C-alpha cells in the first residue's frame, strides 16, 4: 500500500514536470508571427513559420498561417498542396483547400493535377 502511494506521488511529480515544460516551437512560432506581421513580404520568415506551425499540431494555427501566406503569395502552388496535405493530417478537409487553390490559380496544370489526384484518391 505504501509503495503504491509513493509511486502515485512520483508519477504526479513527473506529470507536473512535463506539463510545465514550454514547447520551444511555440516560442519560435510567436517570434516568426511577429516577423511576418512586421514584414509580410519576408518569404523566408513565412516558410520557417509554416514549418514550425506544422510541428505544433494545431489546426487553427495552421490555417491562420497558411491563409496569411497564401494571401501574400497566392501563386505558390506547392504551398497550396502542402496546406491541403497538412490540413488533412490535422483533421481538416483538404478538398476545400484544393478548391481555393484552383480558384486562385485556374491556369496552373500542377494545381489541377494535385487536386484531381486528391479527388481520385478520396
Image (cartoon, rainbow, N blue to C red):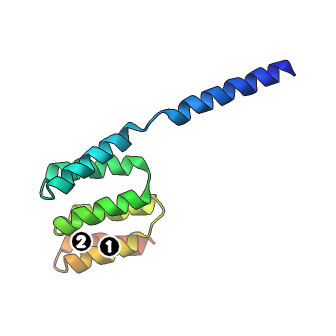
Quadrant in the picture for residue 40: bottom left
35 up-or-down from 90: above or below: above
Q: Is residue 82 visible?
A: no
Q: Circles 2 and 1: CB distance less than 8 Å?
A: yes
Across and down, in percent, residue 89 comes to 44, 58
- In this rendered view, identify the residue nearer to me: 81 or 48: 48
Where disc 2 sits, the SS reads helix
Identity of the residue drawn at 28% across and 52% down = 50
Q: Secondary structure at mark 1?
A: helix
State the residue lying farthest toward the right: 1
Q: Is residue 52 above or below residue 119?
A: above
- Whole-Å distance between the Cαs marked 2 and 1? 8 Å
Figure quadrant of the N terminus = top right
Quick one: 57 or 115, which is closer to the camera?
A: 57
Compared with 99, 59 (above or below) is above
Task: Write down the residue under mark 2.
Answer: 111
User: The C terminus is located in which quarter?
Assistant: bottom left
At a point 24% along the width and 71% down the height, the residue shown is 111
Q: Is residue 88 visible?
A: yes
Image x and y of residue 85, in percent:
37, 61
Amino acid at each position: 500500500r505504501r509503495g503504491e502511494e509513493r509511486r502515485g506521488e512520483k508519477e504526479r511529480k513527473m506529470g507536473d514536470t512535463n506539463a510545465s515544460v514550454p514547447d520551444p516551437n511555440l516560442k519560435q512560432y510567436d517570434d516568426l508571427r511577429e516577423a511576418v506581421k512586421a514584414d509580410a513580404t519576408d518569404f523566408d520568415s513565412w516558410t520557417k513559420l509554416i514549418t514550425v506551425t506544422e510541428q505544433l499540431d494545431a489546426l487553427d494555427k495552421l490555417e491562420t498561417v497558411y491563409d496569411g501566406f497564401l494571401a501574400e503569395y497566392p501563386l505558390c502552388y506547392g504551398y497550396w498542396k502542402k496546406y491541403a496535405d497538412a490540413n488533412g493530417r490535422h483533421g481538416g478537409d483538404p478538398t476545400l483547400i484544393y478548391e481555393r487553390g484552383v480558384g486562385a490559380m485556374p491556369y496552373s496544370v500542377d494545381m489541377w493535377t494535385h487536386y484531381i489526384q486528391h479527388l481520385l484518391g478520396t
